[in-house]
Amino acid sequence: RTAGTVNLAGTMDNSAGYTLNDTRGTLNLSGGTVNGGTITAAPATTSQLVASAGTSTLNGVALDANLTLNNNTTVSVTGGLNLAAGRTISLNTAGSTTTLRFDGTQSLTGAGTVVFGGTSSPNVVRPGAAGQTLTIGSGITIESGTGTGTVGLTGATVQNQGLIRADTSGQTI
């Protein structure tokens, strides 16, 4: 098989890592779980890492690839998330909540960017529940793109060591 899409609805042991490339094709998180390791995008690949349905989980994963969350999708993070320099997580709501949720006391580290995109709101980056803490590392930027969004949750704590900015005219965070 060349290219195409792999729909992950179960659990993937990623301890050895996974490279997105034009032979493997796109990895679609479709309610599945990725445990450990690094997901990397090969240079010049057209393959993508996408979350497109329901709630998927990244457990102790490092991303050296861009991740797109489509409308009405949640990605739950456990075990922390490291986003490599130059990499982007795009939340692309079209009117239904699109969420990057950190369950338990978690950290978003690295040197990448989270962008609120899509055509509407709400895009959300938040701890999983009241009483939990999300630490945003010093190299992380969360910014408005074509959409707006919210960082945080009532009753939870966000420790921001990075940069949160609404840098697109007419957009808010």
Image (cartoon, rainbow, N blue to C red):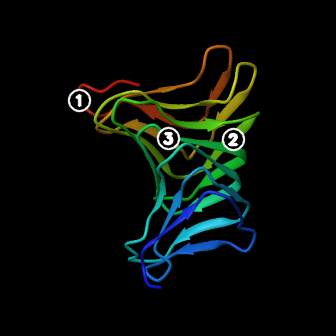
Give the residue type that dot 2 points to.
Answer: Ser
Mark 1–mark 3 distance (CA, rounded to whole Å): 26 Å
Secondary structure of the residue carrying tag 3 is loop
Q: Are marks 1 and 3 in contact (CB under 8 Å)?
A: no
Q: Residues within 10 Å of mark 2 (few under 14, many from 20)?
A: many
Identify the residue under disc 2: 107
Identify the residue under disc 1: 169
Q: Are marks 2 and 1 in contact (CB under 8 Å)?
A: no
**Residue sitting at 52 percent across and 35 percent down?**
99
Mark 2–mark 3 distance (CA, rounded to whole Å): 20 Å
Image height of 79 relative to 164, above or below: below
Image height of 148 relative to 91, above or below: above
Residue 67 percent location from the top left of the image: 48, 55
Where's the C terminus, which quadrant? top left
Q: Residues within 10 Å of mark 1 (few under 14, many from 20)?
A: few
Question: Which numbered disc, 2 or 3, marks the residue that appears first in the sequence?
Answer: 3
Image height of 30 relative to 106, above or below: below
Picture quadrant of residue 130: top right
Q: Please tell me whether mark 2 or mark 3 is closer to you in this view.
A: 3
Residue 21 percent location from the top left of the image: 47, 78
Mark 2–mark 1 distance (CA, rounded to whole Å): 29 Å
